[in-house]
Image: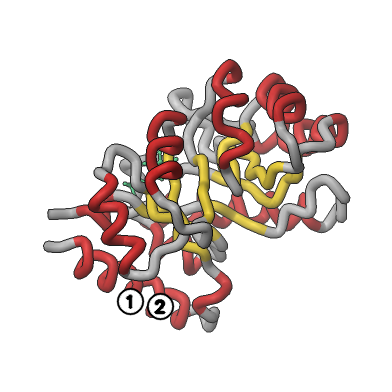
Amino acid sequence: MTIDSNYQRVESAIQSHLNAVTRNRDTLICVAVTKLQSLNDTEVLYQNGCRHFGENRVEGLLEKKSFFKQNDITWHFIGSLQTRKVKEVINKIDYFHSLDRESLAKEINKRAEKPVSCFVQVNVTGELSKHGISPNELDAFIKTIENYPMIHVVGLMTMAPIHAQETELRACFRTLKELQESIASQKLSYAPCHETSMGMSRDYPIAIEEGATFIRVGSALFER
Ligand SMILES: *Cc1c(COP(=O)(O)O)cnc(C)c1O
Protein backbone atom coordinates (compact mmCIF):
# COMPACT_ATOMS: atom_id res chain seq x y z
CA MET A 1 0.00 0.00 0.00
CA THR A 2 1.20 3.48 -0.80
CA ILE A 3 0.53 6.66 1.12
CA ASP A 4 -1.48 7.91 -1.86
CA SER A 5 -3.79 4.90 -1.79
CA ASN A 6 -4.04 5.02 2.01
CA TYR A 7 -5.08 8.65 1.81
CA GLN A 8 -7.74 7.91 -0.82
CA ARG A 9 -9.05 4.97 1.22
CA VAL A 10 -9.28 6.99 4.45
CA GLU A 11 -10.90 9.92 2.64
CA SER A 12 -13.55 7.71 1.07
CA ALA A 13 -14.25 5.99 4.40
CA ILE A 14 -14.61 9.42 6.02
CA GLN A 15 -17.04 10.44 3.30
CA SER A 16 -19.18 7.33 3.58
CA HIS A 17 -19.43 7.48 7.38
CA LEU A 18 -20.37 11.17 7.17
CA ASN A 19 -23.01 10.25 4.59
CA ALA A 20 -24.40 7.61 6.92
CA VAL A 21 -25.30 10.33 9.41
CA THR A 22 -26.09 12.99 6.76
CA ARG A 23 -23.15 15.23 7.51
CA ASN A 24 -21.15 17.23 4.98
CA ARG A 25 -17.41 16.82 4.55
CA ASP A 26 -16.84 20.36 5.81
CA THR A 27 -18.15 19.46 9.28
CA LEU A 28 -15.07 17.33 9.99
CA ILE A 29 -11.35 17.99 10.19
CA CYS A 30 -9.05 15.03 9.75
CA VAL A 31 -5.72 15.64 11.47
CA ALA A 32 -2.99 13.51 9.90
CA VAL A 33 -0.84 12.27 12.76
CA THR A 34 2.69 12.31 11.36
CA LYS A 35 4.58 11.37 14.54
CA LEU A 36 7.67 9.29 13.78
CA GLN A 37 7.05 9.63 10.02
CA SER A 38 9.66 11.03 7.66
CA LEU A 39 9.49 14.47 6.12
CA ASN A 40 9.15 12.89 2.67
CA ASP A 41 6.19 10.74 3.67
CA THR A 42 4.55 13.73 5.31
CA GLU A 43 5.07 15.73 2.13
CA VAL A 44 3.25 13.05 0.12
CA LEU A 45 0.21 13.67 2.31
CA TYR A 46 0.50 17.39 1.63
CA GLN A 47 0.60 16.69 -2.11
CA ASN A 48 -2.61 14.67 -1.72
CA GLY A 49 -4.31 17.72 -0.24
CA CYS A 50 -3.85 17.17 3.48
CA ARG A 51 -3.56 20.48 5.36
CA HIS A 52 -3.83 19.44 9.03
CA PHE A 53 -0.84 17.81 10.68
CA GLY A 54 -0.54 16.57 14.26
CA GLU A 55 2.52 15.70 16.33
CA ASN A 56 2.84 14.44 19.89
CA ARG A 57 6.43 15.46 20.54
CA VAL A 58 7.91 18.95 20.60
CA GLU A 59 10.93 17.97 18.48
CA GLY A 60 8.73 16.33 15.84
CA LEU A 61 6.47 19.34 15.60
CA LEU A 62 9.35 21.80 15.26
CA GLU A 63 11.10 19.65 12.66
CA LYS A 64 8.01 19.23 10.48
CA LYS A 65 6.98 22.83 10.81
CA SER A 66 10.37 24.21 9.77
CA PHE A 67 10.48 21.84 6.77
CA PHE A 68 7.23 23.10 5.25
CA LYS A 69 7.53 26.58 3.83
CA GLN A 70 3.85 26.59 2.83
CA ASN A 71 1.73 28.73 5.09
CA ASP A 72 -1.56 26.93 4.47
CA ILE A 73 -0.97 24.16 7.03
CA THR A 74 -2.76 23.97 10.37
CA TRP A 75 -0.55 22.50 13.12
CA HIS A 76 -1.93 20.42 15.97
CA PHE A 77 -0.16 19.29 19.12
CA ILE A 78 -1.93 16.11 20.23
CA GLY A 79 0.16 14.53 22.97
CA SER A 80 0.87 15.05 26.60
CA LEU A 81 3.11 18.07 27.03
CA GLN A 82 5.58 18.59 29.85
CA THR A 83 5.14 21.96 31.51
CA ARG A 84 8.78 22.88 30.99
CA LYS A 85 8.43 22.37 27.22
CA VAL A 86 5.43 24.64 26.76
CA LYS A 87 7.50 27.67 25.79
CA GLU A 88 9.21 25.84 22.92
CA VAL A 89 6.05 24.96 21.11
CA ILE A 90 2.98 26.87 22.24
CA ASN A 91 3.41 29.77 19.83
CA LYS A 92 4.07 27.43 16.90
CA ILE A 93 0.75 25.59 16.88
CA ASP A 94 -2.86 26.32 15.95
CA TYR A 95 -4.55 23.75 18.21
CA PHE A 96 -3.53 22.05 21.43
CA HIS A 97 -5.51 18.82 21.99
CA SER A 98 -4.39 17.67 25.42
CA LEU A 99 -4.98 20.22 28.15
CA ASP A 100 -5.25 17.97 31.21
CA ARG A 101 -4.16 19.91 34.30
CA GLU A 102 -4.24 23.36 35.78
CA SER A 103 -0.45 23.71 36.04
CA LEU A 104 -0.30 23.30 32.27
CA ALA A 105 -3.04 25.90 31.76
CA LYS A 106 -1.08 28.29 33.93
CA GLU A 107 2.15 27.77 31.98
CA ILE A 108 0.40 28.10 28.60
CA ASN A 109 -1.20 31.30 29.82
CA LYS A 110 2.21 32.65 30.82
CA ARG A 111 3.99 31.77 27.57
CA ALA A 112 1.35 32.31 24.89
CA GLU A 113 1.64 35.45 22.81
CA LYS A 114 -1.95 35.14 21.63
CA PRO A 115 -4.93 33.04 22.76
CA VAL A 116 -4.44 29.32 22.09
CA SER A 117 -7.28 27.08 20.88
CA CYS A 118 -7.28 24.17 23.31
CA PHE A 119 -9.16 20.92 23.76
CA VAL A 120 -9.56 19.71 27.31
CA GLN A 121 -8.62 16.04 27.44
CA VAL A 122 -11.17 13.89 29.25
CA ASN A 123 -10.52 10.40 30.60
CA VAL A 124 -14.02 9.14 29.88
CA THR A 125 -13.57 5.53 30.91
CA GLY A 126 -11.34 6.15 33.94
CA GLU A 127 -8.42 4.04 32.78
CA LEU A 128 -5.56 4.52 35.21
CA SER A 129 -2.99 4.63 32.42
CA LYS A 130 -4.64 7.56 30.69
CA HIS A 131 -4.21 11.28 31.02
CA GLY A 132 -7.23 13.49 31.22
CA ILE A 133 -9.75 15.10 33.51
CA SER A 134 -12.38 12.76 34.91
CA PRO A 135 -15.95 13.54 33.81
CA ASN A 136 -17.07 14.44 37.33
CA GLU A 137 -14.28 17.00 37.69
CA LEU A 138 -14.76 18.55 34.28
CA ASP A 139 -17.12 21.39 35.18
CA ALA A 140 -14.84 22.57 37.98
CA PHE A 141 -11.78 22.33 35.73
CA ILE A 142 -13.44 24.36 32.99
CA LYS A 143 -14.32 27.07 35.53
CA THR A 144 -10.64 27.45 36.49
CA ILE A 145 -9.84 28.31 32.87
CA GLU A 146 -11.54 31.66 33.38
CA ASN A 147 -8.36 32.66 35.26
CA TYR A 148 -6.20 32.03 32.18
CA PRO A 149 -7.23 34.46 29.44
CA MET A 150 -4.78 33.03 26.88
CA ILE A 151 -6.68 29.73 26.89
CA HIS A 152 -9.67 29.33 24.66
CA VAL A 153 -11.46 26.01 25.19
CA VAL A 154 -12.70 25.09 21.71
CA GLY A 155 -13.74 21.56 22.66
CA LEU A 156 -13.10 18.27 24.42
CA MET A 157 -10.76 15.46 23.42
CA THR A 158 -10.58 11.81 24.40
CA MET A 159 -8.73 8.63 23.57
CA ALA A 160 -10.87 5.51 23.60
CA PRO A 161 -9.61 2.32 25.29
CA ILE A 162 -7.35 0.47 22.86
CA HIS A 163 -9.01 -2.92 23.12
CA ALA A 164 -12.62 -1.80 23.34
CA GLN A 165 -15.32 -3.31 21.14
CA GLU A 166 -17.80 -1.27 19.17
CA THR A 167 -20.42 -0.91 21.92
CA GLU A 168 -17.88 0.40 24.39
CA LEU A 169 -16.34 2.74 21.82
CA ARG A 170 -19.74 4.21 20.96
CA ALA A 171 -20.53 4.73 24.63
CA CYS A 172 -17.19 6.46 25.18
CA PHE A 173 -17.63 8.83 22.22
CA ARG A 174 -21.26 9.48 23.08
CA THR A 175 -20.30 10.45 26.62
CA LEU A 176 -17.66 12.88 25.37
CA LYS A 177 -20.25 14.43 23.03
CA GLU A 178 -22.72 14.86 25.89
CA LEU A 179 -20.06 16.45 28.09
CA GLN A 180 -19.12 18.81 25.24
CA GLU A 181 -22.75 19.82 24.71
CA SER A 182 -23.25 20.44 28.38
CA ILE A 183 -20.23 22.78 28.56
CA ALA A 184 -21.31 24.51 25.34
CA SER A 185 -24.80 25.10 26.74
CA GLN A 186 -23.26 27.20 29.54
CA LYS A 187 -22.16 29.73 26.89
CA LEU A 188 -18.91 30.60 28.64
CA SER A 189 -16.94 33.23 26.73
CA TYR A 190 -13.64 31.45 27.47
CA ALA A 191 -15.04 27.97 26.69
CA PRO A 192 -17.41 27.95 23.70
CA CYS A 193 -16.61 24.21 23.44
CA HIS A 194 -18.26 23.45 20.11
CA GLU A 195 -15.83 20.69 19.03
CA THR A 196 -14.98 17.09 19.87
CA SER A 197 -11.57 15.58 19.03
CA MET A 198 -12.10 11.82 19.08
CA GLY A 199 -11.37 8.84 16.85
CA MET A 200 -8.06 7.37 15.64
CA SER A 201 -7.14 4.84 12.93
CA ARG A 202 -8.98 1.98 14.61
CA ASP A 203 -12.15 3.77 15.58
CA TYR A 204 -12.61 6.96 13.53
CA PRO A 205 -15.63 5.58 11.60
CA ILE A 206 -17.51 5.16 14.87
CA ALA A 207 -16.34 8.53 16.18
CA ILE A 208 -17.62 10.22 13.01
CA GLU A 209 -21.02 8.60 13.45
CA GLU A 210 -21.05 9.76 17.08
CA GLY A 211 -20.40 13.36 16.08
CA ALA A 212 -16.63 13.88 16.12
CA THR A 213 -15.63 17.17 14.54
CA PHE A 214 -11.88 16.42 14.66
CA ILE A 215 -10.41 12.94 14.14
CA ARG A 216 -6.70 12.13 14.57
CA VAL A 217 -5.51 9.51 12.10
CA GLY A 218 -1.96 8.19 12.01
CA SER A 219 -1.15 4.57 11.17
CA ALA A 220 -4.00 4.12 8.65
CA LEU A 221 -2.32 6.73 6.46
CA PHE A 222 1.13 5.19 6.66
CA GLU A 223 0.47 1.45 6.31
CA ARG A 224 2.84 -0.32 3.95
C1 LIG B 1 -0.70 8.47 17.83
C2 LIG B 1 -1.90 9.22 18.20
C3 LIG B 1 -3.02 9.23 17.35
C4 LIG B 1 -3.09 8.44 16.06
O1 LIG B 1 -3.13 7.09 16.34
P1 LIG B 1 -3.28 6.00 15.15
O2 LIG B 1 -3.81 4.81 15.84
O3 LIG B 1 -1.92 5.81 14.59
O4 LIG B 1 -4.23 6.57 14.17
C5 LIG B 1 -4.10 10.00 17.74
N1 LIG B 1 -4.10 10.71 18.90
C6 LIG B 1 -3.05 10.72 19.73
C7 LIG B 1 -3.10 11.53 20.98
C8 LIG B 1 -1.91 9.97 19.41
O5 LIG B 1 -0.85 9.99 20.24
For label 2, the residue is: 15
State the residue at coordinates (55%, 21%): 85
- 130 with respect to 193 (left or right): left
For label 1, the residue is: 12
The image position of residue 87, as x and y in percent, is: 61, 25
Element under disc 1: helix
Q: Looking at mark 2, is its residue's CB closer than 8 Å to ligand 1?
A: no
Element under disc 2: helix
State the residue at coordinates (51%, 38%): 125
Amino acid identity at mark 1: Ser
Tag 1 near tag 2, CB within 8 Å:
yes
The image position of residue 201, as x and y in percent, is: 33, 54
- 179 with respect to 36 (left or right): right
Amino acid identity at mark 2: Gln
Residue 223: quarter of image? bottom left
State the residue at coordinates (60%, 47%): 95
Q: Which mark is residue 202?
A: none
Which quarter of the figure is the C terminus placed in? bottom left
Residue 184: quarter of image? bottom right
Image: 91 above or below 69: above
Judging depth in this view, the residue of 9 and 187 nearest the camera is: 9
State the residue at coordinates (57%, 40%): 92
Q: Looking at mark 1, is its residue's CB closer than 8 Å to ligand 1?
A: no
Looking at the rendering, the quadrant in which ligand 1 lies is top left
Image: 48 above or below 200: below
